[in-house]
Amino acid sequence: MKHRTFFWFMLPSGIAMLLFIALPIVSVFVQSLFVENEKVLVEVVTSGPFGTTTQVVVDEAATAVLNAANPLGQFNGFGTYANRNHLAFAEVAEFWRSSDSLGAFARQVYGLPFYKALTFTLAYTFIVTPLIIALGFLIAVAVNALPRLLKGPVIFTSLLPMIITPLVGSLILFWMIDSRGVIGKTLQFIFEDPDLSLKASPMLTWITLMVYGVWSSAPFAFVVFYAGLQTVPQDTLESAMIDGATRWQRIRFVVLPYLMPLVTFIALIQLMDNFRVFEPIVGFNAEANATSLSWIIYNDLRGSEVALFGSAAATSMLTILGVAILLTPVLIRTWRDFSAKGH
């Protein structure tokens, strides 16, 4: 394709990416360098029959004028990134100096809100993503082996978790695992513990959220793998069968290598989605035991009377950086495979 033709072909996509991706990210980065204006306080002297009192109150009119004059707030540079609610450089350095063991240092760092959320986010991402890929592949292989008459109903049933809205699905499961719900009561009966509650324990809460994450996202992997299975060369499979390959050997040495590009594609999508985990935490009301980076952004914007735009923007930029770091190894490997095939 000629350079001129390529330029005009890519121009609409380039403009759309600039307007809807690059500029919003730049806007968020600029906002992350500012913090909210301080409220203007004034002393009000009140005289009454029991004497004179002095109170400090917020001057709403003067505060509004200040906010209008500085809509972004006060310039703080990278101070928001380094404060206690984010990377907390000073606190982490102090913990390192005062801790007598690596475990004690890790426990103190885990107490910081950003690192607590980052721990759950990474654990959720690295546990749920491979389970989604494995479960989706197993379901696709099983459905592909079913008789034609059963495939339609089984495929529809398998897609139900993806059809249900994530927040609604998490609320349904939240009620089911309640101590008075079906799953909660059943677990109490099995373990003979009437006080057993999946919501009370941080570990059980994490497991519940991860199970929900796998359940809700596995259908996506199933659909992609099932479509890919329809394109696997039958000649190669029949040749393997003639050579005496078992079913497992055909999957391992024929099907899986052929579907590897789809594995990479699903891994990329799920890494991004799972690193931004948010709906299950809200749906399960699990923020006491599990928070994520996306939940911190939500809490900064909705958790107090004043929306903390600067703090939310800083967390957003750190989330984007985290996603980029996660995707880089996968993209590098994909690029190398692509380059190797090109030669």
Image (cartoon, rainbow, N blue to C red):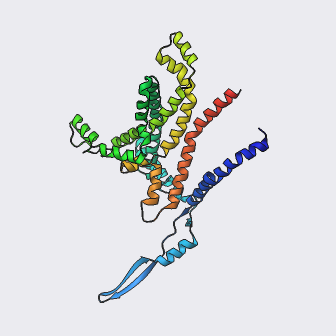
**Closer-to-camera residue (299/242):** 242
Q: Quadrant of residue 325?
A: top right
Residue at the spot 47% in from the left edge and 40% down from the top edge: 125
Answer left or right for 127 relative to 202.
Answer: right
Residue furthest to the bottom: 49
Quick one: quadrant of the C terminus? top right
Residue at the spot 50% in from the left edge and 74% down from the top edge: 63
**Closer-to-camera residue (60/170):** 170
Look at the picture and state if 223 lies above or below 22.
above
Residue furthest to the front: 149
Answer left or right for 210 relative to 191.
Answer: right
Res. 162 in view:
yes
Place of residue 327 in the rendered image (x, y in percent of width and height, measured from the top left):
57, 40
Place of residue 110 in the rendered image (x, y in percent of width and height, measured from the top left):
42, 47
Residue at the spot 51% in from the left edge and 74% down from the top edge: 64
Res. 99 in view:
no
Q: How many marks?
A: 0
Answer left or right for 332 relative to 50.
Answer: right
Look at the picture and state if 228 lies above or below 8.
above
Look at the picture and state if 80 lies above or below 165.
below
Answer left or right for 55 relative to 229.
Answer: left
Place of residue 298 in the rendered image (x, y in percent of width and height, measured from the top left):
45, 55
Residue at the spot 25% in from the left edge and 42% down from the top edge: 196
Quick one: quadrant of the N terminus? top right
Place of residue 297 in the rendered image (x, y in percent of width and height, measured from the top left):
48, 54
Residue furthest to the top: 243
